[in-house]
Amino acid sequence: MTLVDSHCHMDDKQFDPDRDEVIARARDAGVERMMAIGTGNGPPDLECALRLARQHDFIYATVGVHPHDAAKATPETFAAMEVLAGDTKALAIGEIGLDYHYDFSPRDVQREVFVAQLKLAARAGKPIVIHTREAWEDTLLVLREHWSGAGIIHCFSGGAAEARQALDLGFYLSFGGVITFPKAEALREAARMAPEDRLLVETDAPYLAPVPKRGKRNEPAFMVETVRRLAEVRGTSPERIAETTTANFERLLLN
Ligand SMILES: [Zn+2]
Ligand SMILES: [Zn+2]
């Protein structure tokens, strides 16, 4: 079984003591490729994932400003991002979007920075990775007005109705450890109805570890638990999930 972790924060300082071992364990578990998310601690550093991608041929990167860090973005940030977006290892712009749960940046600034990055992604011809939390309606409004390309809803956490809306906009749904949580029945309903050719899997490591590792530091090797549960929910095999999510990743990001 070979898997792609389509969303992990391999630059996170929680991995500083043993990053090489974490990467080796991922490979041993069949996670042969990873997309490292490049938002890090926010601007001015936009290269935290690209640095890892330059060290390992099986690690790919994104560049972007997380909605948490929107208030740190300046014209220089976008100018630098424009250049980095052209890097062959930078597969997507992300994670970008809206987070009204924490409100670490004012909402109007979040929307402004989100739109600016959608325009940048369109110019670069790259897909986007969306982060949305307690901001579903506004996220859809912005996407409908400013985006017509491809993308991923990372750590998709809605139900069947939200899945339908995202799928209608052409998005892929990326499922993470939350799908293993006992209370996530609505999410599992969404996972059941999503078409096979729009599925992706991720860890969002070091966050959101799946059961039975819930509450611990997450790492890409743990994705096996998520894949097993997703297969169960969809009445298929983990091997089939691995095969289709790998093919989907390649179609969307490596073409
Ligand atoms: Zn996120
Ligand atoms: Zn993330």
Image (cartoon, rainbow, N blue to C red):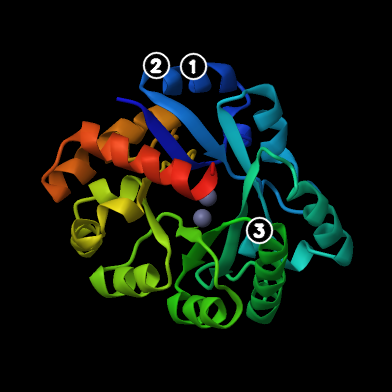
Q: CA distance from mark 2 to mark 1?
A: 6 Å
Task: Give the x, y percent position of residue 81.
Answer: 78, 54
What's the CA distance linking mark 3 and mark 2? 34 Å
Q: Amino acid at mark 1?
A: Ala
When the figure is inspected, residue 32 is found, relative to residue 175, above or below; the finding is: above
Name the residue located 79 percent from the left edge and 56 percent from the top edge.
Answer: 82
Q: Amino acid at mark 3?
A: Gly
Q: Which residue lies under the disc numbered 2?
A: 28
Residue 6: image x %, image y %? 47, 42
Q: Which mark is residue 236?
A: none
Side of 35 where 83 appears, left or right:
right
Residue, disc 3: 125
Q: Quadrant of the C terminus?
A: top right
Q: Residue at x 21, y 57 (%)?
A: 188
Q: Amino acid at mark 2?
A: Asp
Question: Marks 1 and 2: in contact by CB < 8 Å?
Answer: yes
Instruction: State the SS at label 3.
Output: loop
Residue at position x 38%, y 40% from top? Answer: 247
